[in-house]
Image (cartoon, rainbow, N blue to C red):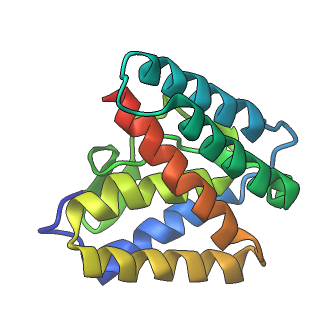
Amino acid sequence: LNKNIFNEQIFVELIDVLKRLHKTKSRRTMFEMKRLENCRKTIMQFLKEDEIIDQERASKHLETLRNYYFEKKIFNFRKTVIHGDLWWDNILVENGKIRIIDWLESSIQDYCHDLAQLKIGTLNEVLDVQKSQYFFKKILDTYKKEFEDETIFERIRYYLPLLYLEESFYL
């Protein structure tokens, strides 16, 4: 997928493919608390090597993030199959049809993980800022309606910074 072929029709097809994937039911869950704790450990390890950034301050910020999201209990939403690696190079377009490849990172989680990753790894990479925001808002509005999901915006606000952090330490 690249900016030369990304248009409204391709976007609609992509959302249809993702909605079909995310309607897959599952009983298995992944604990977000554990994921956030792993991210915190990685960051703290990194900060041990950097005297400039205050470890205690960073740890307090991560603790606040964790408490905010878990006290609100927004992660009680049904888990589903997700792709887990939705960046532009894993989304192929052939004759206007979307094909998603590289399923090695697929798992059972909250579909907001996939949506946040789509924003970071595809929309932000392929489109300018204005179009990326426009299409992402359409995605979230579509999902909110389709899945009757009242906490989608809060969960996205959790996943976006977490994925940015994970990506920055991955690189």
Classify 112 as above or below 50: below
Vertical arrangement, residue 10 with respect to residue 57, above or below = below
Residue at horizontal 76%, vertical 37%? 33
For the residue pair 14 and 94, the one nearer the viewer reads as: 14
**Residue 68 % position (x, y):** 76, 56
The image quadrant where one finds the C terminus is top left
Q: Residue at x 52, y 41 (%)?
A: 84
x, y (%) of residue 51?
A: 37, 23
- State the count of labels: 0
Q: Position of residue 13 (x, y in %)?
A: 42, 71
Instruction: Give above or below for 38 relative to 131.
Output: above
| Residue 111, quarter of picture | bottom right
Residue shown at 70% from the left, 49% from the top: 64
Asked if residue 110 can be seen in this view, the reply is yes
Residue 157 lies left or right of residue 54; in this view the side is: right
**Is 32 positioned to the left or the right of 165 in the image?**
right
**Against 97, is 82 above or below?**
above
Q: Quick check: can you spot residue 30?
A: no
Nearest the viewer among 164 and 48 is 48
Foreground residue, 68 or 23?
68
- The answer to which of 1 and 139 lies nearer the viewer is 139
Q: Position of residue 46 (x, y in %)?
A: 43, 21
Q: Quadrant of the N terminus?
A: bottom left
In-image side of 143 versus 18 (left or right): right
| In the displayed structure image, the side of residue 59 where residue 133 appears, left or right | left
Which of the 4 quarters of the picture holds residue 59?
top right
